[in-house]
Amino acid sequence: MDNTIKTILVPIDFSEQSIVALKQSYNLARLGNRSITLLHVLPESGFNLFGLFSKEHNEKLNKDIEDGIAEKMNILSKEASEKSGMPTNVLIDRGKVYQVILETAEKIKPKLIIMGTRNDIDGKRYIGSNTLGVIREAKCPVISINGRTHHEGCRNIILPLDLTKQTREKVSKSIEIAKYYNSTIKVIAVMLSDKKTQNNRLKVIINQVKNFIESKGITCKAEIINTSEGKRSLAKIIINYAKDNEGDLIMIMTQQEANWVEFFVGSTAQDIINYSDIPVMSIVPQFSSEIIIGGL
């Protein structure tokens, strides 16, 4: 039996948002018996000091900067250990940020990755390229965090369902987290007025999911929302539902087809990640079955 303590990987760039993400890892680490691994990525070619100094002086300045970063990472590590009550490790590597995160994840096999992300341009939000790259290609779930303040626990997990994305792993992961936090899972299905046949199937699926979750001892509520606004409104409806129902985590799938060679994040998933101040867990599906029929 493998008694190894799995880890949670938290990339740190010292931005406010990455520190918010780190704080969100404390409860998950403690409740899930996970260590925390902090990762900082240095520039590939060192810090650009504009060629104002000699090579030797540049190297010394770079070394001083890197030593300062290591010291700051160790301070964060000590604080994380004290507040989570779990072991905390520090990794510092060099390269392209999202590639190093993925390579590190491949080596240490984290249970999940928690990333702070906020990229506001001209008053509009966009997924940062590093966050998007990690979400697209990570083999473990990724929690992306936009908002600045969050509830310490996880009262309600929002679980959107549809017929175009796989649901099995999303349901299983929501049950796992709900058991940690004693959360309620709120299943939501958005019905488009022009999809009557699919909507009938969706009613069957949402009831199957609710019954399965309850069979695992988890409180579950299910709601169907009808809209005539079309598919473009899905993200907005899901985010508003999460806000109105004290959601602390939204769970989404990031691929519409598990066997695509190219990784893909659909437009609804991107909009949820972009605009939700509530943490979003993105899961790349691995199972071959598209929807739940009968039991999981």
Image (cartoon, rainbow, N blue to C red):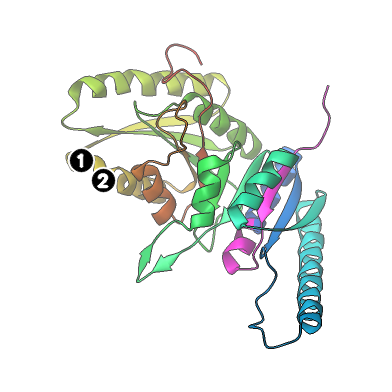
| Residue at 75% over, 80% down | 58
Q: Residue at x 73, y 87 (%)?
A: 53
Asked whether the beta carbons under mark 1 and mark 2 sit within 8 Å of each other, the answer is yes
Task: Please state the extent of the stretch shown in magenta in the rendering.
Answer: 1-21
Query: Who's the residue at 46% across and 64% down the image?
Result: 119
Q: Residue furthest top?
A: 294
Q: With 12 as the anchor, is 151 left or right in this view? A: left
Residue 193: x and y in percent read 17, 32
Quarter assignment of residue 138: top right
In depth, the one of 91 and 296 nearer the eye is 91
Image side of residue 200 versus residue 43, left or right: left
Q: Report whether residue 145 is seen.
A: no
Q: Give the left or right position of residue 256, taking residue 63 as reference.
A: left
Which residue type carries mark 2? Ser
Give how far across and how far down residue 165 sits, in percent. 40, 29
* Local SS, label 2: helix
Residue 6, horizontal then vertical, whole percent:
76, 38
- Residue that badge 1 annotates: 230
Q: Is residue 17 above or below residue 152?
A: below
Pick the residue in front: 149 or 274. Answer: 274
Q: Is residue 15 magenta?
A: yes
- Amino acid under disc 1: Gly
Q: Eyeballing the image, is 53 above or below 247?
A: below
Crowdedness of circle 2 by 10 Å Cα count: few (<14), some, many (20+)? some
Q: In the rendered image, which quarter is residue 110 located in?
A: top right
Classify the position of the N terminus by image quarter: top right
Q: Which residue is mark 2?
A: 233
